[in-house]
Image (cartoon, grey):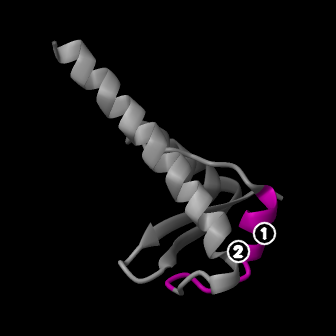
Amino acid sequence: MKKGIALGYDGDAPLILSIAENYLLDKMLEIAEKNNIPVYEDKNLAELLSRLPVGTAVPEDLFEAVAKIFAFCYGINERFKNKMDFLKN
């Protein structure tokens, strides 16, 4: 079963903001697409994180994996910003 995890960062640690599967996962992905929110797929990490309660910090032993996701997302957003800046000129 596919699972989706929405992650955030509170300045101290990454947080689990939402966990979804089935219909809710479809809606979460739809919202992400409509709002240009990057989506990163890692089934194993999603399975691990889905075992934790929403609102909790990601365990330290998973920080590196989550940091890679944040770096991916920030990279996409930066490339998008650069394209938009280029088109403005």
Mark 1 is surrounded, within 10 Å at the Cα level, by few (under 14), some (14 to 19) or many (20 or more) other residues, namely: some
Residue located 70% across and 74% down the image = 50
35 or 72: which is nearer to us?
72
Q: Residues within 10 Å of mark 2 (few under 14, many from 20)?
A: some
> Residue 29: image x %, image y %?
56, 47
Q: What residue appears at the point 67 percent right and 65 percent down from the top-left corner?
A: 65
Report whether 49 appears left or right of 58: right
SS at circle 2: loop
Q: Position of residue 33 (x, y in %)?
A: 48, 38
Q: Are marks 2 and 1 in contact (CB under 8 Å)?
A: yes
Circle number at residue 47 = 1
Can I make out residue 31 in this image? no
Residue highlighted by disc 2 = 50
Q: CA distance from mark 2 to mark 1?
A: 5 Å
> In which image quadrant can residue 80 be found?
top left
Kindly identify the amino acid type of the residue bearing the numbered disc 1. Answer: Glu
| Residue 14 rendering spot, x and y as whole percentages | 50, 75
Q: Which residues are magenta?
A: 43-55
